[in-house]
Amino acid sequence: QKEVEQDPGPLSVPEGAIVSLNCTYSNSAFQYFMWYRQYSRKGPELLMYTYSSGNKEDGRFTAQVDKSSKYISLFIRDSQPSDSATYLCAFLTGANSKLTFGKGITLSVRP
Amino acid sequence: GAVVSQHPSWVICKSGTSVKIECRSLDFQATTMFWYRQFPKQSLMLMATSNEGSKATYEQGVEKDKFLINHASLTLSTLTVTSAHPEDSSFYICSARGSSYEQYFGPGTRLTVT
């Protein structure tokens, strides 16, 4: 079983749609959970980060962590064409550990 | 969020020459910096981890004599690709971590070796 599984996509949605991006993981040692957004030919941008189960909201973005089921999700409300990018889930076993990434999913929001 | 810069954003060099890429944390002190490379449509591959004032720790399969990393201060790390060859052409991205666990990435450097 892979340590992190992320839906491969690509995903195409119309503008205004609610987008749900998901990752499952098998490593019980993961304690910190992050979502990065990467535009083409740019470095990843940290969107959301949390270390606890539950929901964390920031504007149109909501990160959800369920440690008991070992999955994390990112919800994007009222999606915009500017949200078109690759989204990567990422995990840490400890504050000083190396990031483990999902393979990323490419999202396209159609005007 | 915190800001990390990289310079240059794009560099073309001839085979056999060396290229230096700088990574700076602009508004925080980075105790640890990371160097990644990324091929088109692939995820990031960690090359090495560096702590300020210490030797870098390289991932398995990464040649430390070819990819020289120096983390001379809490705001600057450099990656030097020595004797570059066309197969070294890639997108190189650094990230930095301060006192907390979040990692912030630079905008990346596109290296083309001719």
Image (spheres, coloured by chain):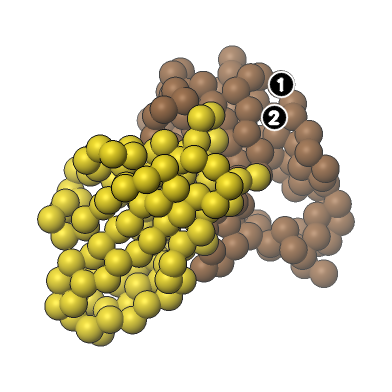
Chain colours: A brown, B yellow
Lower position in the chain sequence, tag 2 or tag 1: 1
Rendered residue at 28%/81% (across/down): B13
Q: Position of residue A105 (x, y in %)?
A: 57, 52
How many numbered marks are there? 2
Q: Where is residue B72 in the image (x, y as percent from the top left)?
A: 31, 47
Image quarter of residue B86: bottom left
Identity, as a three-letter code, of the amino acid under mark 1: Gly
Q: Name the residue under label 1.
A: A54
Image quarter of residue A73: top right
Q: Is residue A10 visible?
A: no
In this view, the residue in front, B40 or A94, is A94
Q: Is residue B99 visible?
A: yes
Q: What is the CA distance from the residue labelled 2 to the residue labelled 1?
A: 6 Å
- Please tell me whether mark 2 sits on a helix, a strand or a loop: strand
Rendered residue at 65%/45% (across/down): B1
* Image quarter (top left, top right, bottom left or bottom right) of the C terminus of chain B: bottom left
Q: Name the residue under label 2.
A: A64
Identity, as a three-letter code, of the amino acid under mark 2: Gln
Image quarter of residue B41: bottom left
Side of A33 relative to A95 (left or right) = right
Q: Report crowding for label 2: few under 14, some 14 to 19, many 20 or more residues within 10 A (C-alpha).
A: many
Query: Chain under label 2?
Result: A
In this view, the residue in front, B112 or B69, is B69
Rendered residue at 46%/18% (across/down): A28
Rendered residue at 78%/39% (across/down): A58
Q: Do the residues labelled 2 and 1 touch (CB within 8 Å)?
A: yes
Side of B108 relative to B89 (left or right) = right
